[in-house]
Image (spheres, helix red, strand yellow):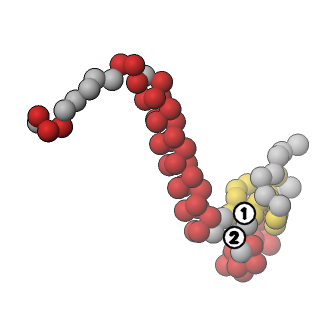
Amino acid sequence: MDTLYANLTISMSEFKKNPAQVLRAAEEKPVAVLNHNRPAFYMISPGLFEALTERLEDQELYDLVRQRLARRHEAVEVDLDAI
């Protein structure tokens, strides 16, 4: 059994009839497009894709900050006025 990561689902054949209508009806929610009752792909709006991308970028920055904070004992003090 496959895990679905969306509350909305549609069959591949129904999706192919009018993809734009499916996107409008879903609003900002993800849609699992099923092929033989198994998820073939997920459709998301551009706004949701942008939000997910920003969240991933934020997580990467957060991880980088945590790594650098863990090594702060290796930091070298620099006087920017002396440069």
Residue drawn at 73 percent across, 66 percent down: 29
Mark 2: amino acid: Glu
Q: Which mark is nearer the camera, 2 or 1?
A: 2
How packed mark 1 is, by other alpha carbons closer than 10 Å (few <14, some 14-19, many 20 or more), is: some
Residue drawn at 70 percent across, 58 percent down: 42
In the rendered view, tell whether residue 82 sits above or below residue 57.
Answer: above
Q: Position of residue 69 (x, y in %)?
A: 46, 29
Mark 1: amino acid: Pro
In the rendered view, tell whether residue 37 sits above or below residue 11.
Answer: above
What secondary structure is marked by label 2?
loop
Residue linked to disc 1: 30
For residue 80, which quarter of the picture?
Answer: top left
* Viewer-closest of 61 and 2: 61
- Quadrant showing the C terminus: top left
Compared across the picture, whether 69 is left or right of 6 comes to left
For residue 12, which quarter of the picture?
Answer: bottom right
Q: Position of residue 72 (x, y in %)?
A: 40, 24
Residue drawn at 77 percent across, 52 percent down: 5
* Viewer-closest of 81 and 35: 81
In three-dimensional space, the C-alpha distance between marks 2 and 1, rounded to whole angstroms, equals 7 Å
Q: Position of residue 53 (x, y in %)?
A: 54, 55
For residue 41, which quarter of the picture?
Answer: bottom right
Q: Position of residue 48 (x, y in %)?
A: 62, 64
In the rendered view, tell whether residue 27 sits above or below residue 29.
Answer: below
How packed mark 2 is, by other alpha carbons closer than 10 Å (few <14, some 14-19, many 20 or more), is: some
* Viewer-closest of 2 and 54: 54
- Return the mark for residue 28: 2
Residue drawn at 52 percent across, 48 percent down: 58
- Quadrant showing the N terminus: top right
Compared across the picture, whether 48 is left or right of 1 comes to left
What secondary structure is marked by label 1?
loop
